[in-house]
Image (cartoon, helix red, strand yellow):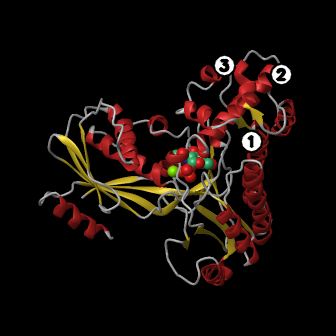
Amino acid sequence: MNIQQLIDLFTQRYNGLQPQFLVKAPGRVNLIGEHIDYMGYGVLPFALEQSCFMLFAIDGNDIQIQHADDQQFKQFNLSVNPKEQYNEIQNYVKYVLAGYRAGIQYGNANQGIKMLISGNVPFSSGLSSSSSLVVASSLMSLQVSGKTQQDIDRQQFVDQIIKFEREAGTACGGMDQTISVFGQEGSALYIEFDPLRLTQVNLPKGYSFIIANSLTESTKLETLGKHYNKRVVECRIGIKLIELTLNLGTNFKTMKQLQDYLQLSLESMEELCKFIPKGEIDLEQLEYLHLPVLLADIPYFELVLNQNKSVNPYNRLVHVVKEAQRVIKFKNICDSKISDDAKAILLGQLMNQSQKSCKDLYECSSENIDTLTSLCIKNGALGSRLTGAGWGGCTVSLVKEADAKNFKNKIIEFFYNHIENQDHIFSTQPSQGASIIKL
Ligand code: NG1
Ligand code: MG
């Protein structure tokens, strides 16, 4: 649907009311650095052209949320400045609410809103459809509060967005919200956290990053206890075990904080992981860690403790420190003076190592992703890996531009059974971060 069609749909749904603003907030692809943002380490994504679009008008006494796809996403009304708990709401409304709460920190939001949501970031696909919606909603409520991005400290704003998205359930890091706000046209960003630092990274010329959907959904909120939040818990247990062995008396939440405190290199952090027992550890054996106290800040940690018998902190943290090293190598290769062809070969190798680590150590790949990444390599990609949280969702492959068409055709033939669908496989360019325009 183009913008004019969306405007018409808004007017039709809201009995002739004209929308006043359009917000656009992009999804993202992460090139390397998976599951390390919440451990404090730098990541390397870029903002997609694919975005969440939100039209809205300030009107009435409540917040009316409608989605262009009203079959899948039911209309929902919230009260302004909602204080009540909504237990039975669709996940998309949770994300709208999270963003709304971030934006109204900045002013007086006692105004009704009518909104219409649409977009072309595929859902549950690891391309950050959730954060693009949260970010769009936060810019909407910022505007309703009488402020624009220019009036506020955008870094603090992003911190608010992250905080409220975590309330929706995922113990996420800050990659998705940061890139959706700060994305830059034409380049990827190396994002470091705590303190936030953004560095432009120029990708090799003559190569594309092609996204392909594994056609298995990566449903995060439904599987928190088994997947995403479990990994965060496992990392935190690993940190605690290292702290206890070294008798540090500290209580760090991220591996990066522990590293900074000890003033060690990432390579030495890998050595420190050896203090963690290898393999699966029964949660029962870890009761002495007082897990409910240790994990109290992690959303839904009880789910993790209830739904699992054991954890594997060693494998998870080895992945984290090695993946963090790969991100730095990736950036250094992009910055180096070698030819673009030579760069692409080295970057591809790092992407493949990352995929292997996600599969074997972090166990966040899936059968379809393994099949798809192998097919991509076989058909000319220099590197191919899952992107985003995993357990389904999309892959990203590095392909020479001249080979891109042939590559796509092969994947359509072998993976998608000859069915061509723009949403399944596409090239994309690094794009600008979120924006709002007055209509
Ligand atoms: P997805 O599920 O792909 O949107 C998540 C997290 C990120 C990061 C990646 C894994 C959210 C909003 N985002 O992304 O912070 O940890 O997984 O690298 O949960
Ligand atoms: Mg997401």
Q: Nearer the viewer, residue 157 or 121?
A: 121
Q: Is residue 173 left or right of residue 284?
A: left
| Circle 2 residue | 245
Image-quadrant location for residue 273: top right
Q: Which residue occupies the foreground of this view, 72 or 140?
A: 72
Residue at image coords 84%, 37%: 278
Taking depth in this image into account, of 145 and 66 the one nearest to the observer is 66
Q: In terms of secondary structure, where does tag 1 sit?
A: helix
Q: Residue at x 77, y 41 (%)?
A: 321
Q: Real-space Cα distance between discs 2 and 3?
A: 16 Å
Q: Mark 2 vs mark 1: which is more N-terminal? A: 2
| Mark drawn on residue 316 | 1
Cβ–Cβ below 8 Å for labels 1 and 3?
no
Q: Label 3: which residue?
A: 290
Tell me which amino acid carries mark 3. His
Tell me the quarter of the image containing the N terminus. bottom left
> Could you tell me which residue is drawn at 39 percent across and 40 percent down?
98
- Disc 1 or 3, which lies upstream in sequence? 3
Tell me if 4 is positioned left or right of 33 in this view: left
Vertical placement of 341 versus 13: above or below? Answer: below
The verdict on label 3 being within 8 Å of ligand 1 is: no
Q: What residue type is labelled 1?
A: Arg
